[in-house]
Image (cartoon, helix red, strand yellow):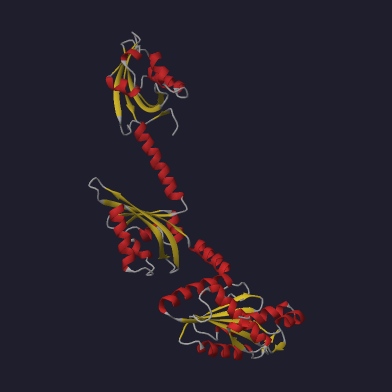
Amino acid sequence: MKYGMTTNTKTPLIVKSGYWDWNIEKKALWWSEDVYRIFDVSTQEFDGTYESFLRFVHPEDKEFVKNAIHGALQQKKPYHIEHRIVMPDNSEKIIHAQAEVFFNKTGIPVRMFGTMQDITESINAEVELKLADIVFKNTLDGVLVTNKDTVILSVNPSFTRITGYNASETIGQTPRILKSHRHDVEFYKDMWSSLLQKGQWQGEIWNRRKNGEVFLEWLSILASKNERGKPDTFVAVFKDITEVREKEEYIKHLAYHDALTNLPNRLLFHDRLQQTLTSARRHANIIAVIFIDLDRFKHINDTLGHNVGDALLQEVASRLKGSVRREDTVSRLGGDEFVVLLPDIKEVDDAALVAKKILSVLSKPYTLYGHELIVTASLGISAYPGDGDDVEILMKNADTAMYHAKEHGKNTYHFFEANMTGE
């Protein structure tokens, strides 16, 4: 707000007020006690002159104040102005001043009587309200305000941009119009318990736009309480984090999956094997690891090109996934090496049945880029608890068994045996 300025006759909210009397003929300015309190000076610090008063006026407003007083004396009209004063500690206050001039019979001004009001707090509050309104209307976050019964009182433009609902469609409704039905009753119970006990709640919540699209938002709710300590309004601030979460999930997926086949990579496979081992120890389950290496893949890749090689690996991945149960894990370790995890099998021989199925499925002809190929594989199997009790040992022993199968004719499988390592 700019100072000084002329105001209309409507006086702002008064915080502190006092009155003064200026005897123009005697050049004596009298202040009431409230004026002294406004200026934060004692009677000894003010000599009762017009010039002394001007010393308190803010340098940037001084000319404005002098002109207002001079104009009242010349035009014989009351004035209403706002200006700043500088306190003894160099802080500033905003003053609303109004005065009326009295003249003698010959038209000479003899006295000026006026009031002075400290409107600093009310002006600051007005500025804060304006700033809050600017923030409310321009923030990128959606904002909605409800009463104690959760009836919506106000929404901002970003609420409309995010949800698709405009103010006229929303005010008088409740936030249930956004409900996605992805959360159970307990979720909302916990939310309200936190709001009523702590006065706030924040977290992720799925909501639904006007067009039916479900989106993920980060939501913060604050309860505003009345003088009795009871919530009377709720302010909810939220941002759409759907795209952020999708990017996070995509990056996470890339970190744990093979780019070519989209199968779990070595890192994810090791993690799943570790979890499966932990469960197997607790429940005395049998698990198996099947190492798979394609026979003569390098020859195919070198002679027919990487496009054919990549397409072959993708088709192998697809066939492997179709050969196992939903709870089994198929992973590509790199190159033409794959591995299958069979958790919770009834007996070790069940792994042989899976291995036979894999060999049969993989040996069927492939038609890729106009080439018909017959591809076989060599498989090695290790099992818990007989062949090892940790990730590295089981992987190593399955790998060893796979090389034994490759050295003994290919297109076959072998279980790990201790004598394969020379023990």
Q: In which quarter of the image is residue 421?
A: bottom right
Q: Quadrant of residue 24?
A: top left
> Residue drawn at (57%, 76%), measured in percent from left and top?
395
Q: Answer whether residue 277 is visible to the viewer in this image.
A: yes
47, above or below 404, in the image: above
> Residue drawn at (32%, 27%), measured in percent from left and top?
117
Front residue of 188/291: it is 291
Q: Give the percent coordinates (x, y) of residue 415.
A: 57, 86
282, above or below 28, in the image: below
Image quarter of the N terminus: top left
279, above or below 226, in the image: below
Front residue of 69/262: it is 262
Front residue of 153/77: it is 153
Q: Give the percent coordinates (x, y) of residue 198.
A: 31, 53
> Residue drawn at (54%, 64%), measured in percent from left and top?
247
Q: Give the percent coordinates (x, y) of residue 68.
A: 41, 22
The answer to whether 384 appears left or right of 292 in the picture is left
Q: Answer whether residue 315 is visible to the viewer in this image.
A: no
Q: Residue furthest right?
A: 303
92, above or below 370, in the image: above
Q: Residue furthest front?
A: 423
